[in-house]
Amino acid sequence: MEQISPVAAARGSQKSTASGASAESSGSVTKRLSQELMNLMMTSPPGISAFPKSDANLFEWAGTIEGAAGTIYSGLTFKISITFPPNYPYVAPTIKFDSPCFHPNVDIVGGAICLDILQDKWSAVYSVQTILLSLQSLLGEPNNASPLNPDAASLWNKPDEYKVQLMKHYRPISDEGSA
C-alpha cells in the first residue's frame, strides 16, 4: 500500500476544496443569471431586452436598447453584447454596443461604454435589468464631463447637428445577416 505524506494529502484536499468551491461559485452564478433572465422575460420594461446568445452558454448575452421617447434616440434600436465574468455579480459584466452608436459616452469604433455603474460604482445588487435601464437612460442623458466620444459631446447641445451625425452612424437592426 502506497503511503501518502501529510503534505501531499493536504495539497490534495486543498485542490478538491478549491475545485469544489469553483464549481459551487459557478453554479451560484448560473443560478443568478437564470433568475435574472426569468425576471427580464416576465417583467422587462418596454425598450430593453437581453437573452443568452446560445443555450449552451449563460455567460454571453445579446441585447437591445431602444432610445426612450422624448430623446434624440427615440425610435432607434441598438444591439449590445454582455459578457458575464465567472465571479458575477461581484464583478460587473462587460457590455459594449455592437451597433454603431454616436454618443458622448460610447466609443463609436469599439462600442465601449463609459458608465460609472459598469466601472467604479458597480454593486452586486445591480441586475441585467437595472444595467439595461441605466444604458437606456444614458442615451438621453449623457455624462459630457467624461466623454469617450469628444465629437459627440461637443455637439450634444446642438440637437439638429447632433441628429445629423447620429443618423450618419446609425444602422437599423436587421434580423438577417447579423449574429
Image (spheres, rainbow, N blue to C red):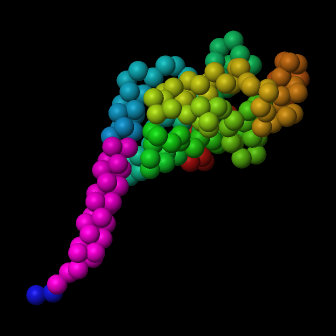
Q: Give percent across and percent down for residue 49.
A: 50, 30
Q: Give percent across and percent down for residue 140.
A: 70, 20
- Magenta stretch, main secondary structure class: helix
Vertical side of 147 occupied by 7: above or below: below
Vertical side of 27 occupied by 6: above or below: below
Q: Nearer the viewer, residue 83 or 23?
A: 23
Vertical side of 37 occupied by 160: above or below: above
Quarter of the image with the N terminus in it: bottom left
Q: Residue at x 28, y 75 (%)?
A: 7
35 left or right of 86 in image: left
> Which residue sits furthest left?
1
> Which residue sits furthest front?
6
The answer to whether residue 179 shows anywhere in this view is: yes
The span shown in magenta is: 3-30
The answer to whether residue 61 shows anywhere in this view is: no
Q: How many marks?
A: 0
61 left or right of 95 in image: left
Give yes or no for residue 18 being in the magenta stretch. Answer: yes
